[in-house]
Image (spheres, rainbow, N blue to C red):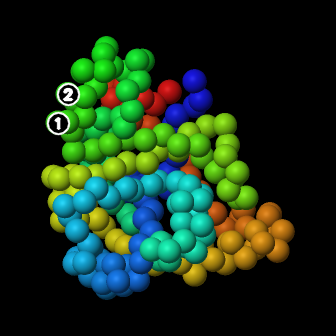
Amino acid sequence: MKERVIRAEYDDQTITVYQAYRKEIAIPTIENQTFVSPFKTTRMTWIKPSFLWMMYRSGWAQKEGQEYILKIKIKREGFEWALQNSCLSHFTKDIYSSVEEWRTIKDNSPVRIQWDPERDLLLNPLNHRAIQIGLSGIAVEKYVNDWIVSIEDITAYSKKIHQLVINDNLEKAKSMLPIEETYFSNYTVNNIIGAT
């Protein structure tokens, strides 16, 4: 089994996650410091603690609809709530006793957990996994109304790192990356999310 450990930029009160959006959603979100229309709370929204996985997903802010990269600090208590009320996106026999049990939990959980290969500066897959957290229903409402501490537009910062990568200045690019350290949750939470 490949290592599944949450790595993130965090302090005693907050943890940083990333999202990418088109201009129509990103600009009012930055201005209001929370998500407002045309953002829809009725849809699942995915938050990612890994900066480089966000760069992979958005193509360094070049993919259509993902031109703005948002750095979002949220309350750790909210992040923990999301993990405690989550279910893995796919059945895993190490976590669930049966497919039926997994389906029942999934149907009653507002949060999805997915583990995807972490990425390096060249966006190549690494041997360990990065967590993606999908929020729906009450989880989105809590995220939008209660958890967000600050929202920062880091699109220019992301593109600056990308330009260094293009220019093969990898050491300089690496020095600009956010410092993401192992984030420890309790034993129960690690079992819920399938952390190793």
Residue 175 occupies quadrant: bottom right
Residue neighbourhood size for the residue with mark 2, other residues' Cα within 10 Å, grouped as few (<14), some (14–19), many (≥20): few
* Picture residue at 22% right of the left edge, 78% below the top: 37
Q: Residue furthest top?
A: 97
Q: Secondary structure at mark 2?
A: helix
Q: Does residue 170 appear to the left or right of 146 in the view shown?
A: right
Q: Secondary structure at mark 1?
A: loop
Q: Quadrant of the N terminus?
A: top right
Callout 2 touching callout 1 (CB < 8 Å): yes
The answer to whether any part of residue 172 appears in the image is no
Give the image location of residue 36, x and y in percent.
23, 76
Q: Position of residue 91 (x, y in %)?
A: 37, 27
Of 124 and 100, nearer the camera is: 100
* Amino acid marked by disc 1: Asn
In the picture of the structure, the residue carrying the numbered disc 2 is 104
User: Is residue 36 shown left or right of residue 89?
Assistant: left
Pick the front one: 117 or 50: 117
What residue sits right under mark 1 in the picture?
108
Q: Which residue appears at 45% of the width and 62% of the height? A: 18
Q: Where 91 sits versus 175, above or below?
A: above
Residue in the picture at 59% in, 59% down: 56
The residue positioned farthest toward the right in the image shown: 168
